[in-house]
């Protein structure tokens, strides 16, 4: 079993839709949960991160963590064509220096 | 130049060639990383350097040889690679490794797309 599972997609949605991206994980020691966005021919960039369980909102983006279910989500409201990218979840324990990534989900927002 | 830069952006090499990838960060960070990104696979951490010292080697084959002459530059020397080594090689930097919860972000370069024939 992989430490982090993420559906690679692709996921295609119309402009304005609400997008839900998800990851599940098996290591209960993970404490920090991140979402990176990677545009084509670019490196990943950190979108947002949360500590432990709960929600965090930043503009159109909401990150949600449910540690009891080992499940994290990223919601994108009012999706735009500029949101078309690959979204990678990543996690880290409180002591390690190594990030554990999901495979990434490719999102396409169409006009 | 700003952020993290990588050269070359694309590289095609034969299995007997020797080549090097270069990474430079302009962020004043002390930690630098090499990752391998293959299609439909998670990013794989290869090496970690902290204050120029290698602190992690993730069981990477010896045909990959990293070099960190200072905190701003990182190289990945390649020799006798295999076709399965074809991938996007990403360099990243962060203020420290292990990180601080207040400085959690790793900053990535655009990557070098490597093809081994």
Image: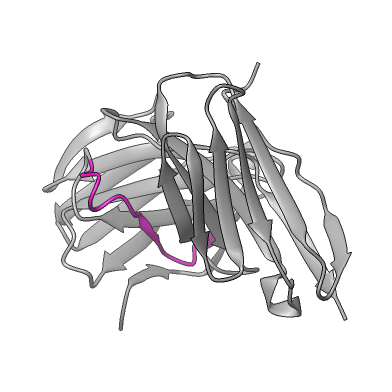
Dominant SS of magenta comes to loop
Kindly identify the residue that appears in the image at 23 percent across and 43 percent down: B99
Q: Nearer the viewer, residue B3 or A87?
A: A87
Q: Quadrant of residue B75?
A: bottom left
Q: Report x, y in % for residue B108.
A: 41, 60
Q: Quadrant of residue B1?
A: bottom left
Q: Report x, y in % for residue A102.
A: 60, 38
| Left or right: A17, with A68 as reference point | right
In the current view of this chain or complex, which residue is farthest to the front? A54
- Give the vertical position of A50 relative to A15 (above or below): above
| Left or right: B68, with A18 as reference point | left
Magenta-span inclusion, residue B111: yes
The colouring scheme, among rainbow, by chain, secondary structure or one colour, is: one colour
Task: Specify whether residue B14 is in view.
Answer: no
**The N terminus of chain A is located in which quarter?**
top right
| Left or right: B30, with B48 as reference point | left
Magenta-span inclusion, residue A86: no
Kindly identify the residue that appears in the image at 34 percent across and 54 percent down: B105
Kindly identify the residue that appears in the image at 76 percent across and 58 percent down: A19
Q: Nearer the viewer, residue A80 or B28?
A: A80
Q: How many marks?
A: 0
Q: Nearer the viewer, residue B17 or A30?
A: A30
Q: Report x, y in % for residue B77.
A: 36, 49
**The C terminus of chain A is located in which quarter?**
bottom right
Q: Report x, y in % for residue A100.
A: 48, 34
Q: Nearer the viewer, residue B7 or B13?
A: B7
Q: Quadrant of residue B62?
A: top left
Bounds of the magenta segment: B99-113
Kindly identify the residue that appears in the image at 74 percent across and 71 percent down: A79
Task: Specify whether residue B105 is in view.
Answer: yes
């Amino acid at each position: 079993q992989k430490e982090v599972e993420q559906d690679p997609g692709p996921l295609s949605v119309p402009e304005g839709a609400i997008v839900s991206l998800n990851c599940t994980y098996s290591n209960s020691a993970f404490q920090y949960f991140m979402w990176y966005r990677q545009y084509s021919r670019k490196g990943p960039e950190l979108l947002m991160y949360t500590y432990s369980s709960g929600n965090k909102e930043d503009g159109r983006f909401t990150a949600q963590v449910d540690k009891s279910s080992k499940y994290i989500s990223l919601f994108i409201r009012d999706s735009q064509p500029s949101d078309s990218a690959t979204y990678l979840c990543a996690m880290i324990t409180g002591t390690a220096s190594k990030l554990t990534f999901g495979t990434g989900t490719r999102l396409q927002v169409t006009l | 130049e700003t952020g993290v830069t990588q050269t070359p952006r694309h590289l095609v090499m034969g299995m007997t060639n020797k080549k090097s990838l270069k990474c430079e960060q302009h962020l004043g960070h002390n930690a630098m990383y090499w990752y391998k990104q293959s299609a439909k696979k998670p990013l794989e951490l290869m090496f970690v350097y902290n204050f120029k010292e290698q602190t992690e080697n993730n069981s990477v084959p010896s045909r990959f040889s990293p070099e960190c002459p200072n905190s701003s530059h990182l190289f990945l020397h390649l020799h006798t690679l295999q076709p399965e080594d074809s991938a996007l090689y990403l360099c990243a930097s962060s203020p420290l490794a292990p990180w601080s919860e207040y400085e959690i972000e790793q900053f990535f370069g655009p990557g070098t797309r490597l093809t081994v024939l």
